């Protein structure tokens, strides 16, 4: 395989959850640039992503789904396969965050964050693997973890728990599925300029503290995560299993 072919995603169909904004949109754009057809899933309208992909001349299929609804999530891989055709990869990126002191954190905020950030990762990955095994297909799964897969954070108990859980699922899936033809890995984004970090970036003191620890000296961009996801979907990463790759400007090394 040539060096370029190792990164070519032409002919691959990849599902990306949370494709409407932020990191999910960045992942979508990177996959499209590498030649993939992306099936983008989000609760919200995907018009902006459709427009951006259109400008690139890429292939994008929007699909609205509510991952807070357990029945929808369980059936989603089968639904996407029946609608668009077999999937070669899955990027479990959809996520939400709720901020409050742990002693005041509500059960509702706990349950909703765990449902989107962790339960959907389990069910979609399970559905993807079942289809791949039944059809004797290889495949790749890329999960969005977090720096808070390694650290505790502040005022985000459900988010921290969910992202520790994503790291654990990535490892157990890799242990069970690597020999069966499915690569499962995760990306741990650092501080990325998205809607999820808007409150932090708007807090001058907190933003300065964060930037002061990042060796690269800047907030990350969605494309920084997207390009890493494209690598983990591509043949170039075929011998990578169970890795959780920080893309954080050096935050964890500090």
Image (tube, helix red, strand yellow):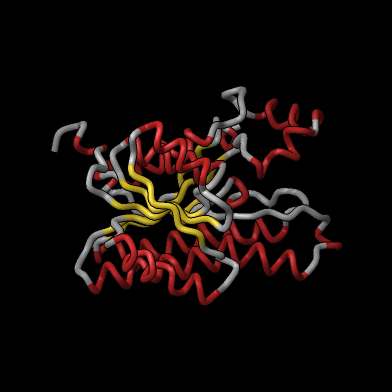
- State the quadrant of the C terminus: top right
- State the quadrant of the N terminus: top left
Specify the quadrant of the image occupied by residue 8: top left
Q: Where is residue 86 in the image (x, y as percent from the top left)?
A: 27, 62
Q: Residue at the location (74% across, 38% down)?
A: 200
Q: Residue at the location (77% across, 53% down)?
A: 99
Q: Position of residue 47 (x, y in %)?
A: 51, 45
Q: Pick the residue in front: 50 or 195.
A: 50
Q: Pick the residue in front: 2 or 33.
A: 33
Specify the quadrant of the image occupied by residue 21: top right
Does 69 appear above or below 163?
below
Does 17 appear above or below 251?
below
Q: Where is residue 92 in the image (x, y as percent from the top left)?
A: 47, 56
Q: Residue at the location (28% across, 58% down)?
A: 139
**199 relative to 135 in the view: left or right:** right
Q: Residue at the location (70% across, 32% down)?
A: 210
For the question of whether residue 142 can be seen, the reply is no
Does 150 appear above or below 192?
below
């Amino acid at each position: 395989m040539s060096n370029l072919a190792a990164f070519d995603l032409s002919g691959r169909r990849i599902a990306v959850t949370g494709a409407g904004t932020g990191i999910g949109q960045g992942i979508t754009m990177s996959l499209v640039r590498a030649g993939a057809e992306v099936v983008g899933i989000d609760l919200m309208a995907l018009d902006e992503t459709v427009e951006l992909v259109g400008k690139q001349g890429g292939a994008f299929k929007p699909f609205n789904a509510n991952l807070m609804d357990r029945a929808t999530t369980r059936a989603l891989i089968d639904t996407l396969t029946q609608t668009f055709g077999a999937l070669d990869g899955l990027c479990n990126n959809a996520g939400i965050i709720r901020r409050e002191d742990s002693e005041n954190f509500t059960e509702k905020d706990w349950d909703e964050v765990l449902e989107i950030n962790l339960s959907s990762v389990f069910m979609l990955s399970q559905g993807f693997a079942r289809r791949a095994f039944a059809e004797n297909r290889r495949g790749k799964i890329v999960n969005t973890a977090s720096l808070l897969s390694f650290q505790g954070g502040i005022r985000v108990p459900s988010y921290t728990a969910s992202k520790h859980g994503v790291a654990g699922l990535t490892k157990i899936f890799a242990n069970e599925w690597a020999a069966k033809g499915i690569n499962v890995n995760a990306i741990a984004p650092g501080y990325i300029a998205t809607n999820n970090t808007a409150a932090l970036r708007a807090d001058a003191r907190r933003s300065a503290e964060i930037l002061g620890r990042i060796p690269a000296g800047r907030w990350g961009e969605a494309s920084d995560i997207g390009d890493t996801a494209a690598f983990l979907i591509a043949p170039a990463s075929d011998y990578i299993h169970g890795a959780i790759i920080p893309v954080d400007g050096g935050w964890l090394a500090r």
